[in-house]
Image: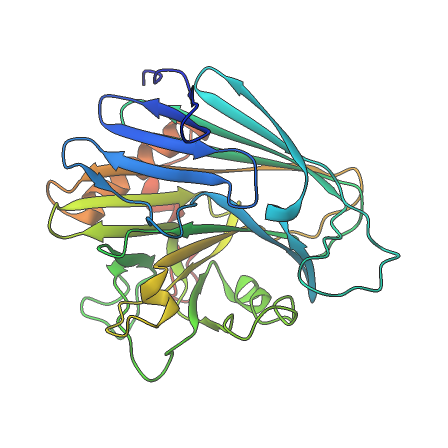
Amino acid sequence: MGKSLDFNYNSDTKNWDFETDDIKCSFQPDGEKNGLKSLIHKSTGFDVVHSKYNWSLNLFMLFANNLCMGQARLIDRTFQIEGDKISISYSPVDNSSSQDSNLFTVNHKVSLNVIYQVKSPNIIDLEITADFKWPYPGYEVFLSNYFNPEMSPFVYVSGSPFAEPPDQPKWISPDSNDVFLGTGLVFSRDQHAARKSIDGRWDRIWGLYQWNPQRYYALPMIAQVNMKHNLATIIMSHPTDCFSVTSGYSSPNPKDPFRDQNPMYMSFFGDDMLPGDVKTVKARMIVDTINTSLDDLAKEAYKDFLDEYYPGHGGVESYIRSTAIGKK
């Protein structure tokens, strides 16, 4: 897999741009709204990133069990550009003595190093390494992504014994309904992971953020699809790295934030961590046209991801989560 061209500084936008044969992107490594600002699929001219909420692959919230530690967006950081990589370092923040409990007070005793790497023809890889200075149970880095509203969200869920055919994983595209209207739809790895979104870690946050646990994911993969161009953006991770994915739904109400922002999120780590622990998680975003089906495109991309980072992985099927008793 060949490398892309190097990042180049754009003095007009003050962002860092890169381009391959298939994609053209812009990235902002500093500031509160850092992350992927634009990701254009060149053959269609379609930008998959939201034009208003234009930051994706953005480190957003920091959590532990029953604890919100604030926003990674507000932490001072340094960055370095090396060829096709952007490396960003987040320093630990100790506000233990502060009596201020608002959302904008960060208290997060972890060093984070984040690497974004572009790979030809259509890949952006993300690596997050956390170096812990404090014990945190159920630690979480919550990654935010905001997509072009002309796209629709899809989640890869475990099979159900009540579906036809039974127990077969499938891509679903949630639609607005009265059951979960106004809530984020959480698709977790398993029963233990499903508890984390409602364990109190979100209690400090605005009332908008009510999370609603749903079915288990089959693989930690989310997608956005533009039907007009038959174009998909897929973000994937390893089940041991990503314990939940969160989706919105298609809504006819332009005031509904899940239509207005068209967000999707990923929850990384999830482990009980001790001082001195160091752990790295990985994710990958691809943009490509759908030739046969979203399922075929996603599974091929997921196999490439496993081949590169987890050699000897045993095949994509061995990672698919099952709700059938006695199966993984």
Residue sitting at x 33%, y 84%:
178
Give the position of the N terminus as an image quadrant: top left
Q: Where is residue 31 in the image (x, y as percent from the top left)?
A: 57, 40
Outermost front residue: 12
- The total number of labels drawn is 0
Choose top left, top right, bottom left or bottom right for residue 90: top right
Please say if 196 is above or below 28.
Answer: below
Residue 169 seen: no
In this view, 99 is above or below 234:
below
> Looking at the image, which is closer to me, 257 or 284?
257
Q: Say which residue appears at 33% left-offset and 45% top-offset.
A: 49
Viewer-proximal residue among 159 and 117:
117
In x, y percent, where is residue 39? 31, 37
Looking at the rendering, which quadrant does residue 67 occupy?
bottom right
Q: Horizontally, is 56 left or right of 130 in the view?
A: left
Query: Which quadrant does the C terminus fall into?
Result: bottom left
Task: Decide if residue 44 is on the left or right side of residue 236.
Answer: left
**Could you tell me which residue is drawn at 26 percent across and 38 percent down?**
287
Q: Is residue 200 positioned above or below 145 on the image?
A: below
Residue placed furthest toward the bottom: 178
Colour basis: rainbow
Report the residue at 35% width, 15% height from top.
5
Residue 76 appears in view = yes
Place residue 18 in its image quadrant.
Answer: top left
| 98 or 237, nearer to the observer | 98
Q: Give the percent coordinates (x, y) of residue 29.
A: 52, 33
Where is residue 93? Give x, y as percent.
77, 45
